[in-house]
Image (cartoon, rainbow, N blue to C red):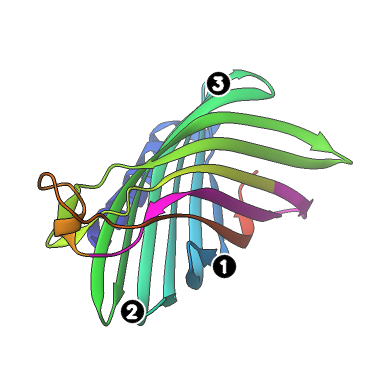
Amino acid sequence: MRHQHITLLAVMLLSAAACGAQERPAILLGASGGESFGNLSLGPMIEVELPLAHHFEWDVRDTFSPLESHIALGHGWANQAEAGGIVWIEKSFGVDGLLTDSTYDVPRLVKSNTYTKMGASFRSAYGGVPLRIFLNYVREVSPPVSHGVESSHLNAGNFRAEATIACSKHFCYRTVLDMSVGHILEQGNPECDGTWGATTCRRRGQISGSGTMGFLVQIGR
């Protein structure tokens, strides 16, 4: 799984080099942390943003959490890799889509999930601060049961805000706020999921949310 994440970033950088000096990528390094549907995370983060032909942007980001904590499951590590793009229909409005691969490894469970994210993108400047806002719908597309572990069937709305708060000669500094609210199924017996046919027991669902914050140093403007 980690090799796949590294491959995504390598493809991104090679594509940037192929585009030449006219379209220079922005590379962002930093850290993020917070709570995601009851689970705590904190760790380093890397992003690559590549603009293409003024109307399209290809984005890849990877967040590694060596301090992952899951309720009733213990402490371990997690990694989340995202790849996708934005089509800027107008200067301040576009549509975006991302594919997310999320993996965590804690003492009582190892699990991988896949999500799609799509919606609207906005960019402007408020008080001289460049700001980008994303309003997306998130849906889990993992197999219902994988290696004996069932999917949480996440359906959520997502809000993400990125603000470039300052720039120096060679670097810019960005803050990121990412929040989601949605419906999930609690971890339970796959036989009660309904995936394998009609049952007399079903897993309980609940409304939950997530909130993470990050700080990134941007190399390339």
- Amino acid at the residue labelled 1: Gly
Badge 1 crowding class, 10 Å Cα cut-off, few under 14, some 14 to 19, many 20 or more, is some
Compute the Cα span from label 2 to label 1. Answer: 18 Å
Label located before the other in sequence (2 or 1):
1
Q: Main secondary structure of the magenta part?
A: strand
Can you tell which quarter of the image residue 85 is in?
top left
Can you tell which quarter of the image residue 106 is in?
bottom left
- Amino acid at the residue labelled 2: Leu
Q: Badge 3 is on which residue?
A: 55
Q: Which residues are magenta?
A: 163-188
Compute the Cα span from label 2 to label 3. Answer: 44 Å
| Closer to the eye: label 2 or 3 | 2
Task: Locate residue 36, reporting x and y percent.
Answer: 50, 62
Q: Which residue lies at the image location 75% right of the left edge and 53% below the top edge?
A: 169
Indicate which disc residue 34 carries. Answer: 1
Compared to residue 161, the image places residue 146 above or below, namely: below
Q: Which residue lies at the image location 59% right of the left edge and 52% below the top edge?
A: 179
Disc 3, SS:
loop
Membership of 8 in magenta stretch: no
Task: Locate residue 161, reporting x and y percent.
Answer: 66, 46
